């Protein structure tokens, strides 16, 4: 499975379109066999980065190595990568079989070899029986499978996926997520997956690079990103995070009238503006006591858990609190005065 | 639909009658057994059509027109395909300007094109007028039409298709023949048909640029002055109308059918 | 969001990939471009050059001179009266024909738009089934021989034509009406008929592109059908309608076939003069000057028209 050998090495990549810089300081490795996600809002440069890996776009500066080979000047058709396009780009004049076999025609394969590989790919993506179906007779999910098979049949060293699930409805998307993860384990190929859906990235990936404004904000495992965000933007992007502003002094945040709070110092938060970051599920509510007190302003009953909003005087945004629905009882009513408490180690001190 | 009479429908029917009425008189009088195009009709005859078989100068002009129209259609489509590809695929600096320049023959009165070509051929280059000079003038006026047909076809499909082809190992040349050309084929065929029709029916440029040999419209024009040639003109005109109509319908049907299948099952 | 910033020329010049793409694009474009330059730009340049030369009998005098242009505006004390308007020119024919051609073309263009707009509206909003068939039905006439469509009107309007013989046959008149053919009216009617099919498509496309929810919103906000048409549909279809008007006006000013066949002596236009100077009077340089002046005047009329209706504003609104 995942090893530490890099399959993709990105070194100081910069990409400009005219006077617009869309990627800068891109410098990291993607490891052999891992499921790697590029996560960010639209326009953050993640798709451009993927297209640079595919060879469809050329970086303006910096270098790219795939499997140790420099890729400068190597066009898309000679790279050991294949891509699943966001629109799937199924060739409308060809049927399923011909679409999947499209790339094999460019390799030195005998006809029976090619046919065997197409058949294998068809059953790998569970399209058995649809080989001669025309492109326009396929459903969204089937088109996605054809796109996947068409790329995998070429046995690339890296498979690039550009938001392949975004066009599917929720139920199908969740099903395909599981299948995609299982497929990646079966074929053992490195997947580079672009998405704007943080939940999807957390579910699927071994590691995730969070991108914004053309830069990588943080690169870590899903757990690392959730538990240890290095700055405020990552904290806000992954999951829900309560932020209490103040001045950071090492592992202590001075929030003025609200008090001083201890936490784990992350990144470079010292001596300046900072935040105490608290996940909703790390907070506890009680009828009195606690580090902060406020009133319940919203409550949403979700069955297994209850989400509260607690308005705290002196805090601009109400705190989000997620409570496990363990005890029976009515919980807290709207307008009830509550105390909010947490373990000393649960809070993170973040820079701006 | 409401039961009340829709004024627009009435207008549409009157409009179609106005559009087709005068032209449809031509076959009516061509089949009429009389020397003038007058009412009342005298009776049905095919003699005007059968007389055409013996008219050698007309047949010669027809053959000339056919030869010119076929070469013009092929040439302007062959020039139009790479140009349409360049304008629809590459964001070229100055591309919009080049495109406007290419479309100029659409808005320049054809008499200006005709005399300009006449001047450069005769006065500057000293080239004899022939069917070749006619064909070259026709390429000029067909190119904008062929290009717009081809471009609308090429712009109709997802640019990711060509990227996918490259990603799957095809060189640009292979991508063109395995993907772009098959997808553009309906547009190519309708471009060929349009080039053919425009060239075949063109009169002004042929009139100015033809030498001793003439094309069918120029021949037809020369006959219009003589009242005794009217029945023959009517018969020839009717055949040309029927022929062009069939070709136009073919071109449009192929283009529309192509458009329908190019974006199948859009999500 | 992406970050916009100034790039220094050094790093911009590194975008060789983009330059290579441009070169490939222009390489693909070059055959067509070469043909267009050789067959359009150079001949027009030659035409301009010729207009500065003069014809002396059978000799072409290549000394550059403005004589041809001057002859078009040389004043004369004796006015030539045309429709009550005095022209104080020693060679008034080009000026008169130019004005006449513009008026006839404008009339034909207005007629074309008035005829084509309801038809385009019908296609866009009324036709629900067999739309493709209707569009083909509209397109066919434009693609069939221009010469024959014009000639058809000669059959309809002629002395022994369909209208005269038809009316005579049913006893409404006893001798043919002579005013039908060979006059500016016949030319204008024929021009309008020949070009109306061409004008429908651009108008139709701009009507078809109008988001139907805009119309629903206008009704919801209290517009009657007429007000909705005037306040929403008409402004939004303006670009297509203007394009249609230009596509008809520009080529018809210089038309040659229609005035020759149905115009008679009274219905001649500027195109006839150009043809006459080139092929009959053997004065190609003067013909070239007339053709060039014609193009300049067309361009001027178009520019004035676009300025008058505020085309820049209409275009900006569309984006």
Image: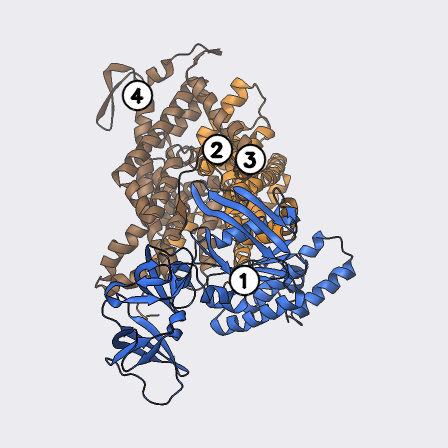
Residues at discs 2 and 1 both on one chain: no
Marks 1 and 4 belong to one chain: no
**Chain where mark 1 sits:** A
Please state the horizontal and vertical placement of residue C209, each as a whole percent of the image: 38, 55
What numbered label is drawn on residue A183?
A: none
Q: Label 1 to label 3, Cα distance in Å?
A: 41 Å
Q: Confirm whether circles 4 and 2 share one chain.
A: yes
**Could you tell which of marks 2 and 3 lies nearer the N-terminus?**
2
Query: What is the number of the mark on residue A207?
Result: 1
Q: Is residue A83 above or below residue A144?
A: above
Q: Which residue is mark 3?
A: C23
What colour denotes chain B? Answer: orange
Q: Label 3 is found on which chain of the structure?
A: C
In space, the residues marked 4 and 2 are separated at their CA atoms by: 62 Å
Pick whichever of labels 4 and 2 is earlier in the sequence. 2
In the figure, B86 relative to A345: above or below? above
Question: In the figure, the blue chain has which letter?
Answer: A
Give the Cα distance between marks 2 and 3.
20 Å
* Chain to which the residue tagged by mark 4 belongs: C
Mark 4 sits on what residue?
Answer: C92
> Foreground: A120 or A70?
A70
> Residue C180, can we see it?
no
Would you identify the image quadrant in which residue A150 lies?
A: bottom right
Of the numbered discs 4 and 3, the one sitting upstream in the chain is 3
Q: Nearer the viewer, residue B82 or A299?
A: A299
Q: Which residue is mark 2?
A: C10
Q: CA distance from mark 4 to mark 3?
A: 52 Å
Q: CA distance from mark 1 to mark 4?
A: 85 Å
User: Which one is in front in this view, the residue at disc 1 or the one at disc 4?
Assistant: 1
Can residue C214 be seen here? The reply is: yes
Task: Name the side, left or right, on which A297 lies relative to B153.
Answer: left
Nearest the viewer among A325 and C174 is: A325
């Amino acid at each position: 499975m995942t090893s530490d050998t890099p399959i993709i090495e990105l070194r100081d990549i910069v990409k400009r379109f005219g006077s617009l810089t869309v990627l800068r300081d891109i410098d990291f490795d993607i490891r052999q066999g891992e499921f790697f996600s590029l996560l960010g809002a639209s326009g953050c440069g993640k798709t451009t980065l993927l297209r640079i890996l595919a060879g469809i776009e050329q970086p303006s500066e910096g270098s790219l190595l795939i499997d140790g080979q420099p890729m400068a000047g190597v066009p898309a058709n000679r790279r050991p990568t294949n891509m699943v396009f966001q629109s799937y780009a199924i060739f409308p004049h060809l049927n399923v079989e011909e679409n999947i076999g499209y790339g094999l025609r460019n390799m030195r394969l005998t006809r029976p070899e090619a046919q065997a590989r197409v058949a294998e790919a068809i059953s790998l993506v569970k399209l058995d029986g649809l080989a001669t179906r025309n492109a326009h007779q396929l459903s969204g999910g089937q088109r996605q499978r054809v796109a996947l098979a068409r790329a995998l049949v070429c046995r690339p060293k890296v498979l690039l996926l550009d938001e392949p699930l975004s066009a599917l409805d929720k139920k199908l998307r969740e099903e395909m997520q599981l299948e995609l993860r299982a497929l990646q384990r079966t074929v053992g190929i490195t997947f580079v997956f672009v998405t704007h859906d943080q939940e999807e990235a957390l579910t699927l990936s071994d590691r995730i690079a969070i991108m914004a404004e053309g830069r990588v904000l943080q690169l870590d495992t899903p757990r690392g990103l959730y538990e240890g965000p290095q700055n405020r933007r990552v904290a806000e992007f992954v999951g829900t995070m309560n932020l209490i502003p103040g001045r950071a002094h090492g592992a202590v945040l001075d929030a003025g009238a609200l008090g001083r709070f201890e936490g784990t110092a992350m990144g470079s938060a010292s001596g300046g503006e900072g935040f105490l970051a608290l996940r909703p599920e790390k907070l506890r509510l009680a009828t009195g006591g606690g580090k902060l007190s406020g009133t319940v302003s919203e409550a949403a009953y979700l069955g297994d858990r209850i989400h509260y909003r607690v308005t705290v005087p002196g805090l601009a945004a109400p705190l989000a609190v997620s409570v496990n629905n363990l005890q029976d009882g009515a919980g807290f009513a709207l307008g009830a005065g509550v105390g909010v408490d947490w373990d000393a180690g649960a809070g993170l001190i973040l820079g701006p | 639909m409401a039961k009340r009479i829709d004024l627009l429908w009435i207008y549409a029917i009157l409009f179609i009658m106005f559009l087709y009425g005068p032209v449809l008189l031509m076959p009516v009088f061509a089949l009429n057994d009389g020397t003038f195009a007058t009412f009342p009709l005298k009776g049905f005859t095919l003699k005007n059509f059968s007389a055409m078989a013996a008219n050698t100068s007309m047949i010669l002009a027809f053959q000339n027109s056919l030869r010119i129209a076929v070469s013009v259609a092929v040439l302007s489509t062959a020039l139009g395909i790479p140009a349409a590809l360049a304008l629809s695929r590459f964001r070229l600096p100055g591309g919009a300007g080049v495109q406007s320049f290419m479309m100029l023959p659409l808005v320049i009165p054809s008499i200006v094109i005709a005399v300009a070509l006449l001047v450069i051929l005769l006065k500057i280059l000293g080239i004899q007028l022939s069917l070749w000079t006619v064909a070259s003038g026709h390429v000029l006026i067909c190119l904008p039409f062929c290009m717009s047909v081809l471009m609308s076809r090429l712009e109709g499909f997802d640019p990711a298709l060509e990227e996918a082809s490259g990603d799957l190992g095809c060189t640009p040349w292979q991508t063109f023949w395995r993907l772009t050309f098959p997808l553009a084929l309906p547009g190519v065929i309708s471009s060929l048909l349009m080039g053919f029709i425009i060239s075949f029916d063109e009169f002004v440029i042929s009139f100015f640029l033809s030498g001793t040999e003439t094309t069918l419209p120029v021949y037809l024009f020369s006959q219009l002055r003589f009242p005794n040639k009217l029945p023959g003109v009517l018969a020839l005109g009717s055949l040309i109308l029927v022929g062009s109509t069939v070709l136009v319908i073919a071109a449009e049907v192929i283009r529309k059918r192509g458009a329908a299948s190019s974006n199948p099952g859009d999500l | 969001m992406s970050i916009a910033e100034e790039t220094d020329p050094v790093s911009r010049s590194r975008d060789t990939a983009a330059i290579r793409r441009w070169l490939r694009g222009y390489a693909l474009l070059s055959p067509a471009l070469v043909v267009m330059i050789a067959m359009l730009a150079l001949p027009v340049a030659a035409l301009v050059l010729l207009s500065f030369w003069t014809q002396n009998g059978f000799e072409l005098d290549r000394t550059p001179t403005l004589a041809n242009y001057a002859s078009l505006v040389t004043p004369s004390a004796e006015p030539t009266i045309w429709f009550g308007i005095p022209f104080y020119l020693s060679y008034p024919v080009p000026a008169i024909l130019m004005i006449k051609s513009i008026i006839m073309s404008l009339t034909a263009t207005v007629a074309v738009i008035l005829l084509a707009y309801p038809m385009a509206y019908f296609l866009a909003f009324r036709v629900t089934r067999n739309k493709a068939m209707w569009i083909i039905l509209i397109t066919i006439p434009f693609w069939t021989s221009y010469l024959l469509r014009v000639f058809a009107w000669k059959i309809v309007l002629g002395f022994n034509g369909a209208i005269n013989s038809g009316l005579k046959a049913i006893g409404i008149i006893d001798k043919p009406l002579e005013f039908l053919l060979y006059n500016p009216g016949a030319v204008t009617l024929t021009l309008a008929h020949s070009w109306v099919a061409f004008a429908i498509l651009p108008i139709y496309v701009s009507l078809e592109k109008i988001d139907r929810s805009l119309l629903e919103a206008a009704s919801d906000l209290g517009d009657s059908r007429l007000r909705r048409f005037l306040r929403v549909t008409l402004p939004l279809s303006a670009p297509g309608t203007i394009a249609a008007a230009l596509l008809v006006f520009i080529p018809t000013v210089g038309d040659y076939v229609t005035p020759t066949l149905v115009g008679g002596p009274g219905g001649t236009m500027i195109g006839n003069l150009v043809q006459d100077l080139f092929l009959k009077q053997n004065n190609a340089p003067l013909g070239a000057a007339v053709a060039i002046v014609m193009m300049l005047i067309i361009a001027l009329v178009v520019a004035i028209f676009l300025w008058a209706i505020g085309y820049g504003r209409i275009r900006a609104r569309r984006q």
